[in-house]
Amino acid sequence: MKKLFFTSVAFTIFSLSSLAQENPYLVTGRSFVGGGLSLVISENEEPGTDFITGRSTKDNLFGISPTYGKLFNERWAAGVRVSLRFGNNSNTIIGNGFTNESVRASTNISITPFLRRFFPISDRFGGYLQPELSYAYERANSEETFQDTNSPINDRMQTFESNGHTGRVGAQGGLYYFVTPHFLVETSLLRLDISYGTTDRRRTDSNARPEDNTQLTRTDIRLNLVNQLSFDQILTLYYYF
């Protein structure tokens, strides 16, 4: 009797374990494609002070990020994401008798191989954690102007061209939901990045001097939450074959 009882318990545990591990959506060998859309439109004005009568900034960003991946078992997938972003930024300072304005336009392209670990809560719904590496190249052009209404001799205009390279290691995590057996929607709740980059900035106007050229290096550690209108963070759609 005892032997039969333990055999039945073992069979039940094995059956439940097998059932818990099987998922009709996360199947070994399934490929998926998708992507995100980034859109940032912001405008900010600050009140003046004794020397500055007004300050305003404008930021516009548009980006796309097509993605391909494949499940190599029921919990792990590997893939790659390519991102292309276009940005424009302007900053204007108006003071007592002068105006200082800077305008910058940039193009950024990056490639990001990644792994993804799924944590199913039900057949359709669960969480994920995605460690990833990334390389990005950015090219930008900027123009800086200064106008002095009291002494026009102080007026000046400078143009710059910059090229930047950034390497990044990080991870992101969030939630996913299979709307149908083929369509998955996910949201990214947080992202941790550690990055190192270099930027060469070269002055290009007719008054350029060699000492105006600079090279900058930077190291960043950032934890980002969803805090802007960026659909590659808030909402991403994937199609599973």
Image (tube, rainbow, N blue to C red):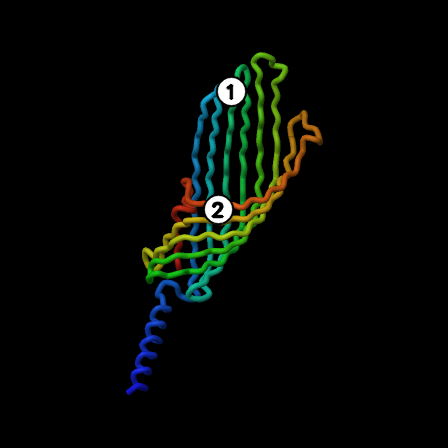
In percent of width and height, residue 134 lies at 54, 51
Find disc 1 in the rendering and name its residue: 52
| Left or right: 78 in relation to 24 | right
| Left or right: 60 in relation to 18 | right
The number of discs equals: 2
Quadrant the C terminus occupies: bottom left
- Residue shown at 63%/15% (left/top)? 153
In percent of width and height, residue 111 lies at 54, 50
Quadrant the N terminus occupies: bottom left
In percent of width and height, residue 93 lies at 52, 23
Which of the two residues, 150 or 69, is positioned nearer the viewer here? 150
Give the residue type that dot 2 points to: Leu
- Residue shown at 46%/58% (left/top)? 116
Residue 97 image-quadrant placement: top right
Give the residue type that dot 1 points to: Ile
Which of the two residues, 215 or 191, is positioned nearer the viewer here? 191
Find disc 2 in the rendering and name its residue: 223
* Crowd rating for badge 2 (residues with CA inside 10 Å; few <14, some 14–19, many 20+): few
* Crowd rating for badge 1 (residues with CA inside 10 Å; few <14, some 14–19, many 20+): some
Above or below: residue 132 compared with residue 141: below
* Res. 20 mark: none
Q: Between disc 2 and disc 1, whose residue precedes?
A: 1
In percent of width and height, residue 139 lies at 58, 39
